[in-house]
Amino acid sequence: MALRLYNTLTRKKEEFRPIEPGKVRLYTCGPTVYNYAHIGNLRSYIFADILRRTLEYLGHEVTQVMNVTDVGHLTSDADQGEDKMEVEARKEGRDIWEVARYYEKVFFDDIEKLNVQKPAIVCRATDHIPDMIELVTKLVERGHVYETEQALYYDITTFPSYTQLSRQLLDDKIVGARDEVQEDPGKRHPADFAVWFKCVGRFANHIMRWESPWGVGFPGWHIECSAMSMKYLGNTLDIHTGGEDHIHVHHPNEIAQSEGATGEKFVRVWMHGAFLVLGKSKEAEGEQKMAKSTGNFLRLQTLIDNGCDPLAYRYMCFSAHYRQKLTFTWDALNAAAAGYRNLISFASRAKQIGGEEAAWVSEYRQRFVDAISDDLNMPQAMAVVSELVREANTRQEFGVLEALYDFDRVLGLRLREAVESTTAVADNVSLGTGAPAAETVESLIREREQARAAKNWTRADEIRDMLKEWGIVLEDSPSGTLWRKVD
């Protein structure tokens, strides 16, 4: 089955064909590092990671680029408010650069805990100011940008297909933009957006500032992604990912800037992940979008502090398609955690029992490929995993471990690591006999099986209790006695 992806630009699934066969240029909108990423943000990066893993699983070589926005993102996605970085630095009483590096580190620590692969290229906005100035200069030369006393703005009337991605009527966008107080009377159109701010007026004391042909200033948020993505991936990208909140402002602006400067198509496939919402609570009616702007969000560390394995949250994200809203509740997370533990437990048993992979497993391999190839249908992919486990238990044939490990190249649940840590005992630990622990355990299990066969239940129970004191849990199954090490 060919890989089919939903393209927001066309509003339909399309067979994916990269510009260069076998190679994919992927850009992922990264974090604005003024605060902690909440678990709704992190869902978007899990989605992008599944996309990358799927592409690689199907044989593509992927170059993924992600930006880090550490300047220029105002408190409104339009041109109102202050720079989010400065607001947070002032609130915390810390140096703005220190704030940026701190939250950047926490973000990448979080995605590592979720086993989200780090992009090949991570680019900070503040390291690419010359690239942004060069891009703005091209837009000025091509007549897309005009200058006021306060900023340089992109004139959206010079780009007729501006609303193609959002499917929003231009009049509606203008009305929406007018609803906010306009900070610059020189703006020609309420929906025009800044590509460069001057350090005058409301930004006279802006801390992060650079020399430019238009005076000292700093870049607008939207210009950053255009400049950095094209610097590393070329004028046309295969795929661009982000949250669904970028469909109406940020991504249309990226398209206008990039295509306005190059005259070439900017992105072939646009992919957007849906929001994570908080479930109903006594304090609030209905579901609530998770957002840092309202303080209504949960950090990954909050889940960890409540005893949750971060990968259980990753597992939970597979319960809904990336284009569908996912509702977070603690019950749903606990259910996902139980499902994740059960999968590890089954895989651990499969490792101990062993066996060759039977012919019937090939059907599940194909069904898994079909699921991920159908626009990353992770709920269906997990259904395949569950049915594989169920059939293995029914047949009492456990030669399925390699298939599970293969699926985990996409799932990213670290199954192999979990299985090995669950079933292994360190070689330098012994049970009092001087023999390595694993060998001792297996020897005692054989002795216990002999005792059970002789109906010497007392000795069998003694061995079970002895092993339990060392953290070894036994499980009697039709295929023999299984053991695992627990804390």
Image (spheres, rainbow, N blue to C red):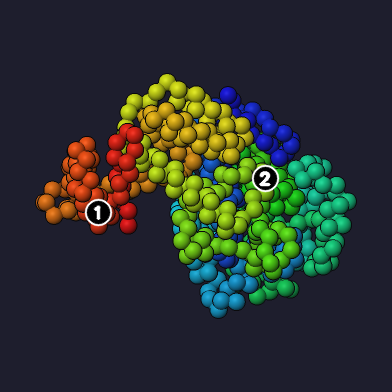
Residue depicted at 69% across the width and 67% down the height: 282
In the image: residue 42, left or right of residue 291: left
366 or 198: which is nearer to us?
366
Which of the numbered marks, if any, corresponds to residue 291?
Answer: none
Residue depicted at 75% across the width and 66% down the height: 80
Residue 131 placed where, x, y %?
A: 59, 52
Sequence-wise first label, 2 or 1 = 2
Residue 176 placed where, x, y %?
A: 83, 58
Residue 392 placed where, x, y %?
A: 43, 31
The number of numbered discs placed on residues in the rendered structure image is 2
The amino acid type, in three-letter code, at marker 2 is Gln
Residue depicted at 42% across the width and 20% down the height: 359
Residues under labels 2 and 1: Cα distance? Answer: 49 Å
Could one spot residue 47 in this view of the protein? no
The amino acid type, in three-letter code, at marker 1 is Asp
Residue 389 placed where, x, y %?
A: 46, 35
Is 368 located above or below residue 79 in the figure?
A: above
The image quadrant of residue 360 is top left
Residue on which the image places disc 1: 465
Residue on which the image places disc 2: 324
Residue depicted at 49% across the width and 28% down the height: 364
93 or 264: which is nearer to us?
93
Give the quarter of the figure containing the C terminus. bottom left
In the image: residue 445, left or right of residue 484: left
Q: For the view shown, which residue lies furthest in the bottom direction? A: 93
Is 117 located above or below residue 5 in the figure?
A: below
